[in-house]
Amino acid sequence: QVQLQESGPGLVKPSQTLSLTCTVSGGSITTAYYTWSWVRQPPGKGLEWMGVIGYDGSTYYSSSLKSRTSISRDTSKNQFSLQLSSVTPEDTAVYYCARLSSRWYIYGMDYWGKGTLVTVSS
């Protein structure tokens, strides 16, 4: 039973960096061949994939967010984190961490966190 839990501040000021952490239990983020992702959903909009970090620490980002996005991990804590810099109110969204299915292109994400709302406002 894999469980993911997002944590971090629910309010971030414009121009600052949004930082969130996903704590994983029931599975190791270093176990091949799992990949761990961040997804967000702005109010009234659909899900937007942000990026992933692989079991080996390799990262891949959405082309639209790559310049502002960084995903990292702390293997000792079995956590991976998201940093989104230079935020604006348009970055207000529910942020989810999730694990990719081994056949993600067919099944998408197989485990999700509950999501956490981050509001960007002064």
Image: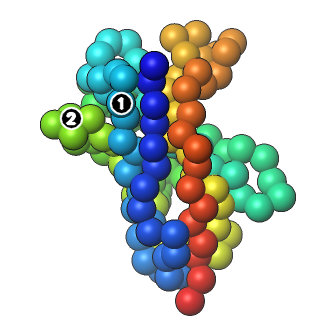
Q: Quadrant of residue 83?
A: bottom left
Kindly give the residue lying farthest to the left in the view shown.
Answer: 76
Kind of residue sitting beneath label 1: Ser
Q: Position of residue 78 (x, y in %)?
A: 26, 35
Image quarter in which the C terminus is found: bottom right
Q: Is residue 39 above or below residue 107?
A: below
Mark 1 highlights which residue?
Answer: 25
Q: Position of residue 38 (x, y in %)?
A: 51, 42
The circle drawn on residue 42 is none
Q: Say whether residue 32 is visible.
A: yes
Q: Position of residue 97 (x, y in %)?
A: 51, 41
Tag 1 and tag 2, C-beta contact below 8 Å: no
Residue at x-position 64% and y-position 22%: 108
Kindly give the residue lying farthest to the bottom in the view shown.
Answer: 122
Residue at x-position 58% and y-position 49%: 115
Given residues 9 and 86, the one toward you in this image is: 9
Q: Is residue 103 above or below residue 20?
A: above
Q: Quadrant of residue 42?
A: bottom right
Given residues 58 and 77, the one toward you in this image is: 77
Q: Say whether residue 51 is visible.
A: no
Kindly give the residue lying farthest to the right in the view shown.
Answer: 44
80 with respect to 112 (left or right): left
18 with respect to 32 (left or right): right
Mark in the foreground, 1 or 2: 1
Residue at x-position 30% and y-position 40%: 79
119 with respect to 34 (left or right): right
Q: Position of residue 52 (x, y in %)?
A: 46, 35
Numbered circles on residues, count:
2
Kind of residue sitting beneath label 2: Thr
Q: Is residue 98 above or below residue 84?
A: above
Mark 2 highlights which residue?
Answer: 75
> Which callout, 1 or 2, points at the residue further toward the start of the chain?
1
